[in-house]
């Protein structure tokens, strides 16, 4: 039986892939029925992402909740990087030793590497042209994926505001854009990842799949990778995890891992 390895060599915790596959299949079946019955989402929003729901044993220390953690997996949540609308936010602040990233330099580099980016947006232009609530909403709706130079990632919540960060659906993914870095690998990984933002409570979610454009096995692969990635960045790793569930935004949460309160063993269903 194939199993999910936590990525922690000191841990014996495993989640069987058939458990994940059963949950994914059930969720996709539920979503198809919902669509065929023409039932609108409870929230009123169109949301066809599958989420990995993490429940911790204890509320994490505030140091863990300050910034999101990048969780990578093998399959993009977009139909393909080439077909999705993507925006790359670059750090054009003055830097020593002529390290400032100009629009022309970035544009030439991503084109030479064949990187599929729809729009390059300078930090200075983001600050000047997207001050109003309406302009931020327009920006949010114009692109499927946002990537940003990791050097400015902590500045973006204040600049982009609650339009981007309240529901945490299109938070810019940090990428390393050092001049001598591997931009192609960084940006390709940016398309194949999601952000885990640990909440100030015990429950947090991270996107791992999508109803449209993804096969069952692709979603299973992503869940496998996401579980391992999440365990590596949460407090106490597996020792701090109470449960994992899979769900759509408006569906029931299906368990794939639960800690038995009596003896501390894993229980899967």
Image (cartoon, helix red, strand yellow):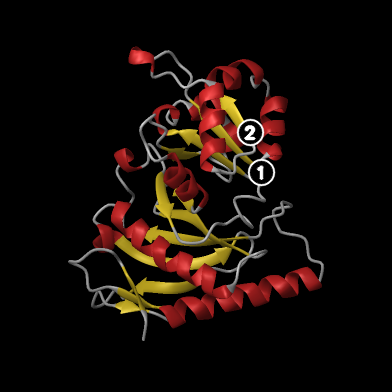
Verify CB contact (< 8 Å) between mark 2 and mark 1.
yes
Q: In which quarter of the image is the C terminus?
A: bottom left
The answer to whether residue 123 is above or below residue 112 is above
Q: Is 145 situated left or right of 42 in this image?
A: left
Q: Residue at x 53, y 40 (%)?
A: 171
Task: Give x and y (percent) for residue 75.
Answer: 51, 61
Viewer-side residue, 222 vs 227: 222
Tag shown at residue 60: none
Viewer-side residue, 146 vs 137: 146
Q: How many labels does the image show?
A: 2
Badge 1: few (under 14), some or many (20 or more) residues near its Cα, within 10 Å?
some
> Which quarter of the figure has residue 224?
bottom left
Badge 2: few (under 14), some or many (20 or more) residues near its Cα, within 10 Å?
some
Q: Where is mark 2, residue-wise?
A: 119
For marks 2 and 1, the one nearer the N-term is: 1
Residue 67 seen from this side? yes
User: How far apart are the alpha carbons under marks 2 and 1?
Assistant: 8 Å
Q: In which quarter of the image is the N terminus?
A: bottom left
The kind of secondary structure element at disc 2 is strand
Residue 56 seen from this side? no
Task: Give x and y (percent) for residue 116.
Answer: 59, 44
Task: Give x and y (percent) for residue 124.
Answer: 55, 17
Q: Where is mark 1, residue-wise?
A: 85
């Amino acid at each position: 039986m194939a199993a999910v390895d936590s990525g922690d060599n000191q841990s014996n915790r495993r989640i069987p892939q058939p458990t994940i596959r059963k949950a994914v299949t059930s969720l996709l079946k539920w979503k198809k029925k919902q669509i065929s019955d023409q039932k609108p989402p409870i929230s009123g929003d169109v949301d066809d992402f599958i989420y990995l729901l993490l429940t911790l044993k204890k509320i994490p220390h505030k140091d863990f909740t300050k910034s999101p953690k990048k969780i990578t997996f093998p399959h993009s949540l977009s139909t393909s990087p080439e077909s999705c609308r993507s925006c790359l936010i670059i750090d054009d602040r003055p830097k020593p030793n002529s390290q400032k990233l100009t629009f022309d330099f970035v544009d030439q580099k991503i084109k030479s590497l064949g990187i599929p980016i729809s729009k390059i947006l300078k930090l200075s232009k983001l600050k000047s042209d997207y001050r109003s609530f309406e302009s931020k909403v327009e920006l949010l709706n114009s692109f499927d994926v946002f990537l940003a130079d990791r050097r400015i990632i902590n500045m973006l919540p204040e600049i982009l505001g609650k339009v981007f960060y309240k529901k945490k659906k299109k938070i810019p993914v940090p990428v390393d854009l050092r001049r001598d870095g591997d931009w192609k690998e960084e940006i390709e990984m940016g398309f194949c990842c999601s952000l885990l933002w640990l909440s100030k409570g015990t429950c947090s979610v991270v996107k791992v799949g999508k109803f449209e454009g993804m096969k069952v096995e692709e979603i299973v692969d992503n869940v496998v990778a996401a579980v391992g990635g999440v365990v590596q960045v949460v407090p106490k790793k597996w020792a701090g995890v109470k449960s994992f569930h899979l769900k759509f935004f408006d569906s029931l949460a299906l368990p794939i891992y639960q800690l038995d309160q009596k003896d501390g063993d894993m229980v899967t269903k």
